[in-house]
Amino acid sequence: MSEQLTADEKRTLVKAAEDILDKVAKTKLEKSFWEQASQLRNLVQIAQQESEVPVLKNFIHYQTGRRATKAFWRPIHESVIRELEAIESRHPEQAARKLAIQSFFGYLVRHYVYLKETH
């Protein structure tokens, strides 16, 4: 039987993704923040293979420290990591955690594109 997220969990993940990006969209961001959708798409790709939160946190920390990508990650990395930790606590089982992480990153991408095009 394949894992599925409950409607409540989907709503929680969508709200978390939207809240993270809505909060930073209200601040003065470097222009390059809106030119790095690939950063979120990379996370979606990584989440296809990886569901261990420490590994994902390590990747986010690395990207936050890189000169080429820090303008994107600095405003959101702490909030994204907090949500990953919340997902991990709600979903200790690997299959459900992986699906929740993939969904969360997908919702981040969608909302990022929406904000980018309407900002």
Image (cartoon, helix red, strand yellow):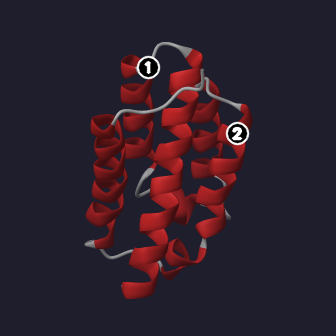
The mark found on residue 91 in the picture is 1
Q: Quadrant of residue 1?
A: top right
Tell which of 78 and 108 is nearer to you: 108
- Residue furthest bottom in the image: 118
The residue shown at (55%, 77%) is 32
* Residue drawn where x is 65% and y is 43% of the image: 62
**Residue 98, percent across and down?**
58, 29
- Which secondary structure, mark 1? loop
At label 2, the amino acid type is: Gln
Q: Is residue 58 above or below residue 34?
A: above
Q: Is residue 56 left or right of residue 7?
A: right
Q: Earlier in the sequence, mark 1 or mark 2?
A: 2
Q: Residues within 10 Å of mark 1 (few under 14, many from 20)?
A: some
The residue lying toward the viewer, choosing from 89 and 77, is 89
Near mark 2 (Cα within 10 A), the count class, few <14, some 14-19 or many ≥20, is few
The extreme top residue here reads: 92
Q: Residue 48's mark?
A: 2
Q: Quadrant of residue 83?
A: top left
Mark 1 residue type: His
**What is the x, y in percent for residue 23?**
26, 62
Q: Is residue 85 left or right of residue 51?
A: left
Q: Position of residue 6 (x, y in %)?
A: 35, 33
Residue drawn at x 48%, y 35% is 100
Give how far apart the Cα atoms at labels 1 and 2 are: 16 Å
Secondary structure of the residue carrying tag 2 is: helix
